[in-house]
Image (cartoon, grey):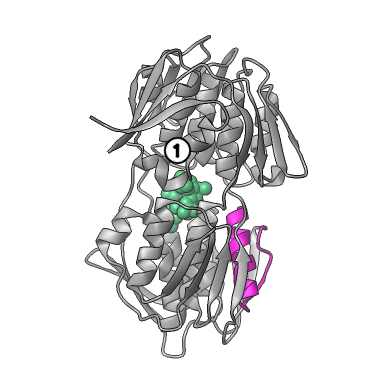
Amino acid sequence: MERLVIEGGHRLEGTVQICGAKNAALPLIAASLLSDRPVTLTNVPELADIRSMLTLMEHYGVAVKGPSHAVMTLDAGAAVNKEAPYDMVRRMRASVLVLGPLLARFGHARVSQPGGCAIGARPVDLHLKALAALGATVSLDGGTIDARAPDGGLTGGRIVFGSPSVGATETALVAAVFARGETEILNAARDPEVCDLAACLVAMGAAIEGAGTHRILVRGVTGLKPARHEIIPDRIEAGTYAMAAAITGGHLELTGARLEHLGAVGAVLEAADVQLWPTDRGLMVSGTGRPRGTDITTEPYPGFPTDLQAQFMALMAIADGASMIRETVFENRFMHVPELSRLGANVTLQGTSALVRGVPRLKGAQVMATDLRASVSLVLAGLVAEGETIVNRVYHLDRGYEALDRKLVRCGARIRREAAP
Ligand code: EPZ
Protein backbone atom coordinates (compact mmCIF):
# COMPACT_ATOMS: atom_id res chain seq x y z
CA MET A 1 0.00 0.00 0.00
CA GLU A 2 1.26 3.47 -0.78
CA ARG A 3 0.55 6.79 0.86
CA LEU A 4 1.07 10.48 0.07
CA VAL A 5 2.93 12.72 2.51
CA ILE A 6 1.92 16.35 1.89
CA GLU A 7 3.52 19.46 3.36
CA GLY A 8 0.83 22.14 3.33
CA GLY A 9 1.06 25.87 2.71
CA HIS A 10 2.43 26.13 -0.82
CA ARG A 11 0.57 28.13 -3.49
CA LEU A 12 0.16 26.30 -6.80
CA GLU A 13 1.46 28.13 -9.84
CA GLY A 14 1.85 26.66 -13.31
CA THR A 15 0.24 24.47 -15.93
CA VAL A 16 -1.59 21.15 -15.66
CA GLN A 17 -2.35 18.99 -18.71
CA ILE A 18 -5.88 17.57 -18.36
CA CYS A 19 -6.12 13.94 -19.55
CA GLY A 20 -8.85 12.12 -21.46
CA ALA A 21 -12.01 11.51 -19.42
CA LYS A 22 -12.07 8.25 -17.43
CA ASN A 23 -15.87 8.16 -17.58
CA ALA A 24 -15.84 8.57 -21.34
CA ALA A 25 -13.02 6.07 -21.93
CA LEU A 26 -14.65 3.23 -19.95
CA PRO A 27 -17.93 3.05 -21.96
CA LEU A 28 -15.98 3.61 -25.20
CA ILE A 29 -13.72 0.63 -24.50
CA ALA A 30 -16.73 -1.56 -23.61
CA ALA A 31 -18.50 -0.45 -26.81
CA SER A 32 -15.63 -1.81 -28.92
CA LEU A 33 -17.18 -5.25 -28.31
CA LEU A 34 -20.03 -4.21 -30.62
CA SER A 35 -17.92 -4.14 -33.74
CA ASP A 36 -15.97 -6.69 -35.77
CA ARG A 37 -13.84 -3.81 -37.11
CA PRO A 38 -11.02 -2.01 -35.23
CA VAL A 39 -11.62 1.13 -33.18
CA THR A 40 -8.73 3.49 -32.42
CA LEU A 41 -9.08 5.77 -29.39
CA THR A 42 -6.77 8.72 -28.75
CA ASN A 43 -6.25 10.88 -25.62
CA VAL A 44 -6.58 7.71 -23.53
CA PRO A 45 -5.79 8.35 -19.83
CA GLU A 46 -3.27 6.11 -18.01
CA LEU A 47 -5.45 4.91 -15.11
CA ALA A 48 -5.95 1.75 -13.08
CA ASP A 49 -9.63 1.61 -14.09
CA ILE A 50 -8.67 1.73 -17.77
CA ARG A 51 -6.26 -1.17 -17.25
CA SER A 52 -9.03 -3.13 -15.50
CA MET A 53 -11.42 -2.55 -18.40
CA LEU A 54 -8.72 -3.60 -20.92
CA THR A 55 -8.15 -6.81 -18.92
CA LEU A 56 -11.87 -7.49 -19.24
CA MET A 57 -11.67 -6.87 -23.01
CA GLU A 58 -8.86 -9.40 -23.29
CA HIS A 59 -11.09 -11.84 -21.37
CA TYR A 60 -13.41 -11.63 -24.41
CA GLY A 61 -10.57 -11.98 -26.90
CA VAL A 62 -10.47 -8.34 -27.98
CA ALA A 63 -7.04 -7.57 -29.48
CA VAL A 64 -5.68 -4.54 -27.61
CA LYS A 65 -2.80 -2.50 -29.04
CA GLY A 66 -1.45 0.14 -26.65
CA PRO A 67 -2.21 2.42 -25.00
CA SER A 68 1.02 4.01 -26.10
CA HIS A 69 1.33 7.78 -26.06
CA ALA A 70 -2.39 7.81 -25.20
CA VAL A 71 -3.32 5.98 -28.41
CA MET A 72 -4.93 2.53 -28.37
CA THR A 73 -6.58 0.25 -30.94
CA LEU A 74 -9.20 -2.31 -29.96
CA ASP A 75 -10.13 -5.06 -32.43
CA ALA A 76 -13.07 -7.23 -31.35
CA GLY A 77 -13.23 -9.04 -34.71
CA ALA A 78 -12.40 -12.37 -33.05
CA ALA A 79 -14.15 -11.64 -29.74
CA VAL A 80 -16.11 -14.50 -28.16
CA ASN A 81 -19.10 -14.24 -25.86
CA LYS A 82 -18.36 -15.18 -22.24
CA GLU A 83 -19.69 -14.40 -18.81
CA ALA A 84 -18.20 -11.33 -17.11
CA PRO A 85 -17.05 -12.95 -13.87
CA TYR A 86 -17.87 -11.68 -10.39
CA ASP A 87 -14.28 -10.95 -9.36
CA MET A 88 -13.79 -8.64 -12.37
CA VAL A 89 -17.15 -6.89 -12.01
CA ARG A 90 -16.71 -6.57 -8.24
CA ARG A 91 -13.37 -4.81 -8.75
CA MET A 92 -14.84 -2.26 -11.13
CA ARG A 93 -18.58 -1.65 -11.42
CA ALA A 94 -18.23 -0.06 -14.87
CA SER A 95 -17.69 -3.65 -16.13
CA VAL A 96 -21.49 -3.84 -16.31
CA LEU A 97 -21.17 -1.67 -19.44
CA VAL A 98 -20.30 -4.82 -21.45
CA LEU A 99 -23.92 -5.95 -21.07
CA GLY A 100 -25.28 -3.78 -23.91
CA PRO A 101 -22.64 -4.54 -26.58
CA LEU A 102 -22.57 -8.31 -25.84
CA LEU A 103 -26.35 -8.55 -26.10
CA ALA A 104 -26.50 -6.40 -29.24
CA ARG A 105 -23.78 -8.32 -31.06
CA PHE A 106 -24.20 -11.92 -29.83
CA GLY A 107 -27.90 -11.96 -28.83
CA HIS A 108 -27.02 -13.14 -25.31
CA ALA A 109 -25.08 -11.71 -22.38
CA ARG A 110 -24.27 -12.95 -18.90
CA VAL A 111 -22.70 -10.45 -16.55
CA SER A 112 -22.23 -10.84 -12.83
CA GLN A 113 -24.50 -8.39 -11.06
CA PRO A 114 -22.26 -5.60 -9.74
CA GLY A 115 -22.61 -5.19 -5.99
CA GLY A 116 -22.81 -1.84 -4.32
CA CYS A 117 -19.75 0.19 -3.52
CA ALA A 118 -18.59 2.67 -0.89
CA ILE A 119 -20.83 5.46 -2.19
CA GLY A 120 -24.08 3.56 -2.52
CA ALA A 121 -26.14 0.52 -3.56
CA ARG A 122 -25.59 1.37 -7.24
CA PRO A 123 -28.49 -0.72 -8.64
CA VAL A 124 -28.61 -1.52 -12.37
CA ASP A 125 -32.39 -1.81 -12.74
CA LEU A 126 -32.49 1.00 -15.31
CA HIS A 127 -29.90 -0.80 -17.47
CA LEU A 128 -32.09 -3.94 -17.43
CA LYS A 129 -35.25 -1.92 -18.12
CA ALA A 130 -33.58 -0.50 -21.25
CA LEU A 131 -32.69 -3.97 -22.55
CA ALA A 132 -36.19 -5.29 -21.87
CA ALA A 133 -37.67 -2.34 -23.80
CA LEU A 134 -35.71 -3.56 -26.84
CA GLY A 135 -37.26 -7.04 -26.56
CA ALA A 136 -34.64 -8.80 -24.43
CA THR A 137 -35.60 -11.35 -21.79
CA VAL A 138 -33.70 -10.36 -18.67
CA SER A 139 -33.41 -12.46 -15.53
CA LEU A 140 -31.22 -12.74 -12.45
CA ASP A 141 -29.64 -16.16 -12.17
CA GLY A 142 -27.86 -16.58 -8.85
CA GLY A 143 -26.19 -13.16 -8.89
CA THR A 144 -25.67 -13.18 -12.64
CA ILE A 145 -27.61 -10.98 -15.03
CA ASP A 146 -28.82 -13.09 -17.97
CA ALA A 147 -30.08 -11.11 -20.98
CA ARG A 148 -31.25 -12.85 -24.12
CA ALA A 149 -32.51 -11.29 -27.38
CA PRO A 150 -35.34 -12.90 -29.43
CA ASP A 151 -34.20 -15.09 -32.35
CA GLY A 152 -34.48 -12.22 -34.82
CA GLY A 153 -32.45 -9.93 -32.58
CA LEU A 154 -33.46 -6.80 -30.65
CA THR A 155 -36.16 -4.47 -31.98
CA GLY A 156 -36.30 -0.69 -31.53
CA GLY A 157 -38.57 0.60 -28.79
CA ARG A 158 -39.24 3.46 -26.37
CA ILE A 159 -37.09 3.63 -23.23
CA VAL A 160 -38.28 6.10 -20.61
CA PHE A 161 -35.94 6.57 -17.63
CA GLY A 162 -37.34 7.65 -14.26
CA SER A 163 -34.07 9.44 -13.60
CA PRO A 164 -31.26 10.39 -16.03
CA SER A 165 -28.79 7.58 -15.29
CA VAL A 166 -25.43 7.96 -17.08
CA GLY A 167 -24.64 4.25 -17.25
CA ALA A 168 -28.16 3.16 -18.16
CA THR A 169 -28.26 5.75 -20.97
CA GLU A 170 -24.95 4.35 -22.26
CA THR A 171 -26.28 0.77 -22.07
CA ALA A 172 -29.43 1.82 -23.96
CA LEU A 173 -27.43 3.64 -26.65
CA VAL A 174 -25.14 0.70 -27.37
CA ALA A 175 -27.86 -1.98 -27.18
CA ALA A 176 -29.98 -0.02 -29.70
CA VAL A 177 -27.26 0.27 -32.38
CA PHE A 178 -28.34 -2.91 -34.24
CA ALA A 179 -31.95 -3.02 -32.96
CA ARG A 180 -34.33 -3.18 -35.94
CA GLY A 181 -36.25 0.07 -36.44
CA GLU A 182 -36.09 3.15 -34.25
CA THR A 183 -35.32 3.47 -30.56
CA GLU A 184 -36.33 6.53 -28.55
CA ILE A 185 -34.56 7.14 -25.23
CA LEU A 186 -36.44 9.64 -23.05
CA ASN A 187 -35.07 11.37 -19.94
CA ALA A 188 -31.60 10.38 -21.12
CA ALA A 189 -28.51 11.60 -19.26
CA ARG A 190 -27.03 14.66 -21.02
CA ASP A 191 -23.43 14.30 -19.79
CA PRO A 192 -20.52 15.09 -22.14
CA GLU A 193 -19.37 11.48 -21.69
CA VAL A 194 -22.70 10.24 -23.11
CA CYS A 195 -22.24 12.62 -26.07
CA ASP A 196 -18.69 11.34 -26.56
CA LEU A 197 -19.91 7.73 -26.68
CA ALA A 198 -22.60 8.67 -29.21
CA ALA A 199 -20.05 10.54 -31.34
CA CYS A 200 -17.76 7.49 -31.42
CA LEU A 201 -20.66 5.14 -32.24
CA VAL A 202 -21.66 7.44 -35.13
CA ALA A 203 -18.05 7.40 -36.37
CA MET A 204 -18.31 3.60 -36.29
CA GLY A 205 -21.44 3.79 -38.47
CA ALA A 206 -24.31 3.94 -35.97
CA ALA A 207 -27.30 6.26 -36.60
CA ILE A 208 -27.83 8.40 -33.47
CA GLU A 209 -29.40 11.86 -33.02
CA GLY A 210 -30.05 13.99 -29.95
CA ALA A 211 -27.17 12.94 -27.68
CA GLY A 212 -26.74 15.69 -25.09
CA THR A 213 -30.48 16.28 -24.88
CA HIS A 214 -33.11 14.41 -22.84
CA ARG A 215 -34.34 12.69 -26.03
CA ILE A 216 -32.02 10.47 -28.07
CA LEU A 217 -33.09 8.67 -31.28
CA VAL A 218 -31.24 5.58 -32.57
CA ARG A 219 -31.99 3.95 -35.91
CA GLY A 220 -30.77 0.34 -36.16
CA VAL A 221 -27.95 -0.40 -38.63
CA THR A 222 -26.69 -3.79 -39.81
CA GLY A 223 -22.94 -3.36 -39.56
CA LEU A 224 -20.13 -1.06 -38.38
CA LYS A 225 -16.85 0.21 -39.88
CA PRO A 226 -13.38 0.98 -38.55
CA ALA A 227 -13.24 4.28 -36.65
CA ARG A 228 -10.86 6.64 -34.89
CA HIS A 229 -12.05 8.80 -32.00
CA GLU A 230 -10.44 11.33 -29.66
CA ILE A 231 -11.69 11.06 -26.07
CA ILE A 232 -12.95 14.33 -24.53
CA PRO A 233 -10.94 15.89 -21.67
CA ASP A 234 -11.83 14.87 -18.13
CA ARG A 235 -14.11 17.56 -16.68
CA ILE A 236 -13.87 16.05 -13.19
CA GLU A 237 -10.06 16.13 -13.29
CA ALA A 238 -10.28 19.73 -14.54
CA GLY A 239 -12.70 20.68 -11.74
CA THR A 240 -10.44 19.01 -9.20
CA TYR A 241 -7.39 21.03 -10.26
CA ALA A 242 -9.49 24.20 -10.40
CA MET A 243 -10.27 23.63 -6.74
CA ALA A 244 -6.61 22.90 -6.03
CA ALA A 245 -5.73 26.35 -7.43
CA ALA A 246 -8.56 27.92 -5.43
CA ILE A 247 -7.75 26.26 -2.10
CA THR A 248 -4.08 27.31 -2.23
CA GLY A 249 -4.86 30.83 -3.53
CA GLY A 250 -2.80 29.84 -6.56
CA HIS A 251 -2.99 30.24 -10.31
CA LEU A 252 -3.18 27.27 -12.72
CA GLU A 253 -3.69 26.92 -16.44
CA LEU A 254 -5.56 23.69 -17.18
CA THR A 255 -4.60 22.84 -20.74
CA GLY A 256 -7.23 20.85 -22.62
CA ALA A 257 -10.02 21.75 -20.17
CA ARG A 258 -13.32 23.06 -21.58
CA LEU A 259 -15.38 25.57 -19.56
CA GLU A 260 -18.59 24.43 -21.26
CA HIS A 261 -18.09 20.89 -19.89
CA LEU A 262 -17.92 22.16 -16.32
CA GLY A 263 -21.63 23.02 -16.35
CA ALA A 264 -22.68 24.63 -13.06
CA VAL A 265 -19.18 24.30 -11.58
CA GLY A 266 -18.02 27.50 -13.28
CA ALA A 267 -20.85 29.54 -11.79
CA VAL A 268 -20.34 28.01 -8.33
CA LEU A 269 -16.60 28.74 -8.33
CA GLU A 270 -17.25 32.34 -9.40
CA ALA A 271 -19.79 32.68 -6.56
CA ALA A 272 -17.06 31.41 -4.24
CA ASP A 273 -14.80 34.26 -5.46
CA VAL A 274 -12.61 32.01 -7.62
CA GLN A 275 -11.70 33.51 -10.96
CA LEU A 276 -11.74 31.33 -14.07
CA TRP A 277 -11.67 32.17 -17.73
CA PRO A 278 -11.11 30.25 -20.98
CA THR A 279 -7.77 30.59 -22.78
CA ASP A 280 -6.82 29.31 -26.24
CA ARG A 281 -5.16 26.32 -24.55
CA GLY A 282 -7.89 25.55 -22.03
CA LEU A 283 -8.89 27.20 -18.76
CA MET A 284 -7.15 29.61 -16.37
CA VAL A 285 -8.12 29.39 -12.69
CA SER A 286 -7.00 31.84 -10.01
CA GLY A 287 -7.68 31.77 -6.28
CA THR A 288 -8.07 35.17 -4.66
CA GLY A 289 -7.28 34.35 -1.03
CA ARG A 290 -10.05 32.81 1.10
CA PRO A 291 -13.02 31.58 -0.98
CA ARG A 292 -16.52 32.71 -0.02
CA GLY A 293 -18.92 30.16 1.51
CA THR A 294 -21.28 28.96 -1.25
CA ASP A 295 -24.18 26.46 -1.19
CA ILE A 296 -24.39 23.61 -3.72
CA THR A 297 -26.75 20.78 -4.57
CA THR A 298 -25.38 17.92 -6.66
CA GLU A 299 -27.55 17.08 -9.69
CA PRO A 300 -27.35 15.26 -13.01
CA TYR A 301 -25.44 17.16 -15.72
CA PRO A 302 -25.37 20.14 -16.32
CA GLY A 303 -25.95 20.58 -12.57
CA PHE A 304 -23.10 20.48 -10.06
CA PRO A 305 -21.54 16.98 -10.46
CA THR A 306 -21.56 14.59 -7.52
CA ASP A 307 -17.99 13.66 -8.53
CA LEU A 308 -16.81 17.14 -7.47
CA GLN A 309 -18.78 17.35 -4.22
CA ALA A 310 -16.01 16.06 -1.94
CA GLN A 311 -13.44 18.35 -3.55
CA PHE A 312 -15.75 21.36 -3.15
CA MET A 313 -16.28 20.49 0.50
CA ALA A 314 -12.51 20.63 1.05
CA LEU A 315 -12.51 24.12 -0.52
CA MET A 316 -15.45 25.25 1.61
CA ALA A 317 -13.73 23.92 4.76
CA ILE A 318 -11.47 26.99 4.70
CA ALA A 319 -14.03 29.41 3.24
CA ASP A 320 -15.04 32.75 4.70
CA GLY A 321 -18.55 31.88 5.90
CA ALA A 322 -20.71 28.76 5.88
CA SER A 323 -21.97 26.59 3.03
CA MET A 324 -24.70 23.95 2.73
CA ILE A 325 -23.76 20.98 0.55
CA ARG A 326 -26.65 18.72 -0.54
CA GLU A 327 -25.86 15.37 -2.15
CA THR A 328 -28.86 14.15 -4.17
CA VAL A 329 -27.25 11.64 -6.56
CA PHE A 330 -25.74 8.98 -4.26
CA GLU A 331 -26.95 7.96 -0.83
CA ASN A 332 -23.61 7.62 0.96
CA ARG A 333 -21.15 10.10 -0.43
CA PHE A 334 -19.98 11.85 2.74
CA MET A 335 -17.25 9.43 3.81
CA HIS A 336 -14.70 12.21 3.42
CA VAL A 337 -16.41 14.18 6.21
CA PRO A 338 -14.89 12.40 9.24
CA GLU A 339 -11.49 12.49 7.54
CA LEU A 340 -11.73 16.23 6.75
CA SER A 341 -12.80 16.75 10.37
CA ARG A 342 -9.51 15.13 11.47
CA LEU A 343 -7.81 18.01 9.64
CA GLY A 344 -9.91 20.53 11.59
CA ALA A 345 -12.81 21.04 9.20
CA ASN A 346 -16.10 21.99 10.88
CA VAL A 347 -18.78 19.93 9.13
CA THR A 348 -22.19 18.93 10.50
CA LEU A 349 -24.07 16.16 8.67
CA GLN A 350 -27.88 16.23 8.48
CA GLY A 351 -29.13 13.37 6.28
CA THR A 352 -28.19 14.15 2.69
CA SER A 353 -26.88 17.60 3.62
CA ALA A 354 -23.64 18.80 5.14
CA LEU A 355 -23.30 22.21 6.81
CA VAL A 356 -19.69 23.38 6.43
CA ARG A 357 -18.56 26.28 8.65
CA GLY A 358 -15.36 27.68 7.16
CA VAL A 359 -12.33 27.80 9.47
CA PRO A 360 -9.28 30.04 8.99
CA ARG A 361 -6.87 27.10 8.86
CA LEU A 362 -6.62 23.33 8.81
CA LYS A 363 -3.96 21.29 10.60
CA GLY A 364 -2.20 18.32 9.03
CA ALA A 365 -2.94 14.77 10.25
CA GLN A 366 -3.04 11.15 9.09
CA VAL A 367 -6.22 10.48 7.05
CA MET A 368 -7.70 7.53 5.20
CA ALA A 369 -8.92 7.50 1.62
CA THR A 370 -12.18 5.58 1.15
CA ASP A 371 -13.11 6.13 -2.49
CA LEU A 372 -11.76 7.91 -5.53
CA ARG A 373 -13.21 11.37 -5.07
CA ALA A 374 -13.08 11.36 -1.26
CA SER A 375 -9.35 10.62 -1.46
CA VAL A 376 -8.61 13.57 -3.72
CA SER A 377 -10.56 15.90 -1.39
CA LEU A 378 -8.14 14.89 1.37
CA VAL A 379 -5.19 15.74 -0.88
CA LEU A 380 -6.69 19.18 -1.58
CA ALA A 381 -7.14 19.79 2.15
CA GLY A 382 -3.56 18.61 2.77
CA LEU A 383 -2.27 21.20 0.27
CA VAL A 384 -3.46 23.96 2.56
CA ALA A 385 -3.31 22.32 6.05
CA GLU A 386 -0.53 23.49 8.34
CA GLY A 387 2.26 20.94 8.67
CA GLU A 388 2.18 17.41 7.30
CA THR A 389 -0.85 15.46 6.07
CA ILE A 390 -0.55 11.76 5.29
CA VAL A 391 -3.19 10.32 2.94
CA ASN A 392 -3.27 6.52 3.16
CA ARG A 393 -4.56 4.02 0.55
CA VAL A 394 -3.70 6.12 -2.49
CA TYR A 395 -4.66 3.24 -4.78
CA HIS A 396 -8.10 4.87 -4.72
CA LEU A 397 -6.54 7.96 -6.30
CA ASP A 398 -4.72 6.03 -9.00
CA ARG A 399 -8.05 4.64 -10.25
CA GLY A 400 -9.09 8.02 -11.57
CA TYR A 401 -6.20 10.49 -11.57
CA GLU A 402 -3.14 10.14 -13.78
CA ALA A 403 0.04 11.17 -11.95
CA LEU A 404 -1.82 13.49 -9.57
CA ASP A 405 1.11 13.93 -7.16
CA ARG A 406 3.60 14.54 -9.99
CA LYS A 407 1.32 17.13 -11.61
CA LEU A 408 0.88 18.96 -8.29
CA VAL A 409 4.61 18.87 -7.43
CA ARG A 410 5.39 20.39 -10.83
CA CYS A 411 3.19 23.35 -9.78
CA GLY A 412 4.90 23.88 -6.41
CA ALA A 413 3.21 21.39 -4.07
CA ARG A 414 5.41 19.47 -1.60
CA ILE A 415 4.22 15.85 -1.90
CA ARG A 416 6.09 12.58 -1.72
CA ARG A 417 4.67 9.16 -2.48
CA GLU A 418 6.00 6.36 -0.27
CA ALA A 419 5.23 2.82 0.77
CA ALA A 420 3.11 2.81 3.92
CA PRO A 421 5.15 1.34 6.84
C1 EPZ B 1 -21.44 7.38 -13.58
O1 EPZ B 1 -21.84 6.31 -12.72
C2 EPZ B 1 -19.99 7.67 -13.24
N1 EPZ B 1 -19.18 6.48 -13.51
C3 EPZ B 1 -19.88 8.06 -11.76
O2 EPZ B 1 -18.51 8.41 -11.53
C4 EPZ B 1 -20.75 9.30 -11.53
O3 EPZ B 1 -20.69 9.65 -10.17
C5 EPZ B 1 -22.19 9.00 -11.94
O4 EPZ B 1 -22.22 8.56 -13.32
C6 EPZ B 1 -23.11 10.21 -11.80
O5 EPZ B 1 -22.62 11.25 -12.59
C7 EPZ B 1 -18.87 6.17 -14.80
O6 EPZ B 1 -19.27 6.85 -15.73
C8 EPZ B 1 -18.00 4.97 -15.00
P1 EPZ B 1 -25.78 6.86 -12.65
P2 EPZ B 1 -23.27 5.58 -12.97
O7 EPZ B 1 -26.32 5.64 -13.29
O8 EPZ B 1 -23.53 5.48 -14.41
C9 EPZ B 1 -29.10 5.46 -9.64
C10 EPZ B 1 -16.45 8.40 -10.41
O9 EPZ B 1 -16.10 8.80 -9.29
N2 EPZ B 1 -29.29 4.34 -10.58
O10 EPZ B 1 -25.93 8.19 -13.35
O11 EPZ B 1 -23.29 4.35 -12.15
C11 EPZ B 1 -27.76 5.38 -8.92
O12 EPZ B 1 -27.88 4.54 -7.77
C12 EPZ B 1 -17.76 7.63 -10.56
O13 EPZ B 1 -15.80 8.58 -11.48
C13 EPZ B 1 -30.37 3.49 -10.38
O14 EPZ B 1 -31.16 3.66 -9.44
O15 EPZ B 1 -24.25 6.65 -12.32
C14 EPZ B 1 -27.49 6.80 -8.56
O16 EPZ B 1 -28.22 7.12 -7.39
C15 EPZ B 1 -18.47 7.44 -9.24
N3 EPZ B 1 -30.55 2.44 -11.24
C16 EPZ B 1 -28.10 7.60 -9.74
O17 EPZ B 1 -28.99 6.69 -10.40
C17 EPZ B 1 -29.71 2.22 -12.29
O18 EPZ B 1 -29.94 1.25 -13.05
C18 EPZ B 1 -27.09 8.06 -10.74
O19 EPZ B 1 -26.38 6.95 -11.18
C19 EPZ B 1 -28.61 3.09 -12.46
C20 EPZ B 1 -28.42 4.15 -11.60
Q: Amino acid at mark 1?
A: Arg
* Quadrant the N terminus occupies: top left
Q: Return the residue found at the far bottom.
A: 152
Q: Residue at x 57, y 16 (%)?
A: 319
Residue 1 in view, yes or no: yes
Where on the picture, by quarter, is residue 132? bottom left
In the image, residue 408 lies in the stretch drawn in magenta: no
> Does mark 1 have its CB less than 8 Å from ligand 1?
yes
Q: Position of residue 18 (x, y in %)?
A: 60, 45
Q: Report x, y in % for residue 367.
A: 34, 25
Q: Examine the rendered structure and indicate whether residue 204 appears above or below residue 236.
A: below
Where is residue 197 drawn, in percent x and y? 58, 64
Q: Is residue 414 above or below residue 408?
A: above
Q: Is residue 178 left or right of residue 141?
A: right
Q: Nearer the viewer, residue 309 or 366?
A: 366
Residue drawn at x 54%, y 24% as measured from the top left: 315
Whether residue 165 appears in this view of the structure is no
> Based on the displayed image, in which of its 4 quarters is residue 253 positioned?
top right
| Image quadrant in which the C terminus is located | top left
SS at circle 1:
helix
286 left or right, relative to 152: right
Q: Residue at x 60, y 12 (%)?
A: 320
Q: Which residues are magenta?
A: 188-213
Q: Which residue is mark 1?
A: 373
Residue at horizontal 39%, vertical 69%? Answer: 57
Q: Nearer the viewer, residue 299 or 375?
A: 375
Nearest to the observer: residue 3 or residue 361: 3
Q: Is residue 118 above or below residue 358?
A: below
